[in-house]
Amino acid sequence: QVQLVESGGGLVQAGGSLRLSCAASGRIFNSYAMGWFRQAPGKEREFVAAINWSNITIYEESVKGRFTIARGNAKNTVFLQMNSLKPEDTAVYYCAAALMLGSDYDTWGQGTQVTVSS
């Protein structure tokens, strides 16, 4: 069973940066795709970014050029570097795993709060 644990959230001023981390434990394959999602108060959860085993990445349009997803040297870690943060980026951020890009994400972390003040 795979478990995902996020860390790195916090409070930051607009224009600032945060780096989220996701550590996977349990039986996780290098072929897994890892993704980041977020959910703001009163809104549905939305896709942010994902990366597959060969480092192909995809991003939601509003974060392109500001956020970067990357795998750690240990394949069971994934990071989300968030620069030029905006108040509208405020949300709970979740790490998730899928068998491959485009398949359903069936394993989720508990989430980490990111708050961007104006």
Image (spheres, grey):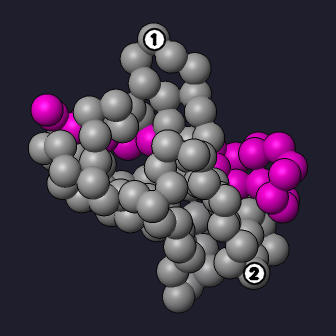
Give the alpha-carbon distance from disc 1 to disc 2, as whole Å: 35 Å
Q: Judge by depth and name the residue closer to the eye, 10 or 66.
A: 66
In the rendered image, residue 54, in percent from the top left (x then y), is placed at 75, 81
Taking 61 as reference, is 91 left or right?
left
The residue indicated by pointer 1 is 42
Taking 2 as reference, is 21 left or right?
left
Q: Which mark is residue 95?
A: none
Query: Where 112 sits versus 66, above or below?
Result: above
In the rendered image, residue 12, in percent from the top left (x then y), is placed at 16, 46
Q: Quadrant of the C terminus?
A: top left
* Amino acid, disc 1: Gly
Q: Is residue 23 visible?
A: no
Label 2: few (<14), some (14–19) or many (≥20) C-alpha neighbours in 10 Å: few
Secondary structure mostly seen in the magenta stretch: strand
Q: Judge by depth and name the residue closer to the eye, 59 or 74.
A: 59
Say which quarter of the image contains residue 101. Answer: bottom right
At x 49%, y 28%, the residue is: 39
Identify the residue at the far bottom of this view: 73
Query: Where 46 sits versus 42, above or below?
Result: below
Query: Where 56 sits versus 44, above or below?
Result: below
Q: Secondary structure at mark 1?
A: loop
Magenta stretch holds residue 103: yes
Q: Is residue 22 visible?
A: yes
Q: Quadrant of the N terminus?
A: bottom right
* Amino acid, disc 2: Ser
**Residue range highlighted in magenta:** 93-118
Q: Which mark is residue 54?
A: 2
